[in-house]
Amino acid sequence: MRHSEIPSGPSVRVLRVGEQVRHVLSEILQRGDVHDDVLASHPVSITEVRMSPDLRHATVFVKPLLGRDEEAVLRALRTNTAYLQREVAHRIRMKYAAKLKFLPDESFDEASHIDKLLRDPKVARDLGESEAE
């Protein structure tokens, strides 16, 4: 198999820019630069930003503190997308303003669900039996 045929993940550059976008968005939201009542009253975590290989699209995963009013927060972020795109492009000095797409971060919910399953007495019993073997 040639090197060019080996499937690989995102490049270091794509990962670095995604992390920069995450930091900038977090800072904007934390400082209250977006004049929106919903965003002002709900602390929001930017948990991850995945950039497209050409850096023109960014999928932003968000989680409101304690998961409260997630739909309202997503709606507010989507309403203010143009402002956020301009600010990100300006602060990172990108050639193009990456199109931001806001999605809820479901990884916490998935982790809680898996933890709950592992704590089930039947699963604990099965795990105990497999360790004894």
Image (cartoon, helix red, strand yellow):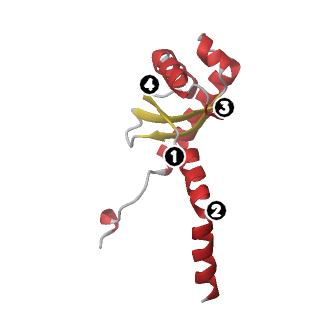
Residue 23 appears anywhere in the view: yes
From the top left corner, tell me how far across and down residue 58 is, in percent: 44, 34
Going from N to C along the chain, the mark reached first, 4 or 3, is 3
Disc 1 to disc 3, how far (Cα)? 25 Å
Q: Residue at x 50, y 50 (%)?
A: 12
Q: Is residue 104 left or right of residue 4?
A: right
- Crowding around mark 3 (Cα neighbors within 10 Å: few <14, some 14 to 19, many 20+) is few
Of residue 12 and residue 49, the one placed in the foreground of this image is 49
* The quarter of the displayed image where residue 57 is located: top left
Going from N to C along the chain, the mark reached first, 1 or 2, is 1
Residue 65's label in the rendered image is 3
Residue 119's label in the rendered image is 2
SS category of the residue bearing label 2: helix
Q: Residue at x 47, y 44 (%)?
A: 14
Mark 4 belongs to which amino acid?
A: Ala
Q: Is residue 40 left or right of residue 105?
A: right
Q: Which residue position is annotated with label 1?
A: 15
Quadrant (top left/top right/bottom left/bottom right) for the C terminus: bottom right
Residue 34 appears anywhere in the view: no
Q: Residue at x 64, y 78 (%)?
A: 128
Mark 3 belongs to which amino acid?
A: Leu
Disc 4 to disc 1, how far (Cα)? 17 Å
From the top left corner, tell me how far across and down residue 82 is, in percent: 45, 16
Labels 2, 3: front one? 2
Residue 129 against residue 48 in the figure, above or below: below
Labels 2, 4: front one? 2
Disc 2 to disc 3, how far (Cα)? 25 Å
Residue placed furthest toward the front = 122
From the top left corner, tell me how far across and down residue 69 is, in percent: 58, 25
Mark 2 belongs to which amino acid?
A: Arg
Going from N to C along the chain, the mark reached first, 2 or 3, is 3
